[in-house]
Image (cartoon, grey):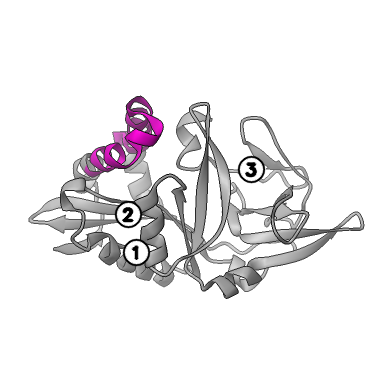
Amino acid sequence: MKVREATHDDADGIRRVADASLEATYAGQLGEDIVAAAADEWYGADRLADRLDADDVVYLVVVDSDEVVAFSESELDVRQPTGEQSPDSADGVAAIQWLHVHPDHRDRGLGGRLLERTETELLERGANRVEGRVLAANRAGNEFYQASGYARTGQRTLDIAGETYTEHLYVNLPADEAAELTEEHEVDGDTVFVAYDERERGSEAPFYAAYNTTDREERYGFYCANCGSLDTSMDSMGRVECSDCGNKRKATRWDSAYL
C-alpha cells in the first residue's frame, strides 16, 4: 500500500474510483443520472488532465498492487489579499474537494491514512488551515471528518440540478478556535460579521460569507478578500462578483456541472 502524488498515468484509475465511489455514496441522494453526469464533468479526460497539471491543485492516490484504490483532490489558495488585511488564519487556506475510496476497499483505514497524508502535503505547500465539505445527507462523510478531528463550523445550501441540498463545512481546528474566525466590519454604520471559515474561491482572491449577526442566522452577503469590500452581488445562478475590483467567484465542485 502506497500513498503518492498522482500522475497522468493514474487518470483511468482515478476515474474508476470516482465512478464507483460517487455511485455508492450519492446515487441514493441525488439520483443515478445526476451522479453519472457529475462524474463525466469532473473526471473527463481533458478536465482531469488540467487538474493534474494545475499548480493550485493537489492530487494524491493510494495504490495497492499497482491499482489506484483511493484518491484525494484538494485546492490551495495561499495568496495574500491586497486590500484590507484579514486575520492570519484566513490566509493559506486549502480545501479538500474530494476524498474517495473505492467501495471494495473501504473499512480498511485507507481514508484516514489518505487524509493524514493530504493534510501534510497541503501544510507543506503553504496552507495553515485545511477545510472539508460534505453534503449533510452523507452520514458516513460527516462522521469521517468529525472522527478525524475536524470541527463543523457552518453550512451552506447548494442547488444541484434544480434541487436544494445542505452542505456542512468543516475545518481542522478545535471548535473554540474556529469560533475566532469571525471578524467585525463596519458598513454604513452597521456591524457585519465576516466568517473566515466559510470561503468561496475567487478569480483574484477568496470571498468570505458575511452575516448581520454573530449566530450566522441572517446572511448579509460576501466579503471580498482582494480589496476588502463588502459591496458584492450574487445573481440567481449563484455567481458572485465584487463591484469594486471585479473579483469573481469560481465554480465549485458541485455547481461546475449545473450552474
Q: Dot 1 surroundings within 10 Å: few (below 14), some, or many (20 or more)?
A: many
Q: Position of residue 125 (x, y in %)?
A: 42, 68
- Find numbered disc 1 in the image and state the secondary structure of the residue it sits on: helix
Q: Quadrant of the N terminus?
A: bottom left
- Looking at the image, can residue 98 be seen? no
Q: Residue at x 38, y 28 (%)?
A: 34
- Find numbered disc 3 in the image and state the secondary structure of the residue it sits on: loop
Q: Is residue 52 left or right of residue 195?
A: left
Amino acid carrying mark 3 in the image: Lys
| Residue denoted by label 1 | 118
Q: Position of residue 120 (x, y in %)?
A: 36, 71
**Sequence-wise first label, 3 or 1:** 1
**CA gap, disc 1 and disc 2:** 7 Å
| Residue denoted by label 3 | 248
**Sequence-wise first label, 1 or 2:** 2
Most foreground residue, 222 or 124: 222
Amino acid carrying mark 2 in the image: Ser
Q: Is residue 94 above or below residue 8?
A: below
Most foreground residue, 142 or 35: 142
| Residue denoted by label 2 | 72
Q: Position of residue 181 (x, y in %)?
A: 64, 68
Magenta stretch bounds: 17-46
**CA gap, disc 2 and disc 3:** 26 Å
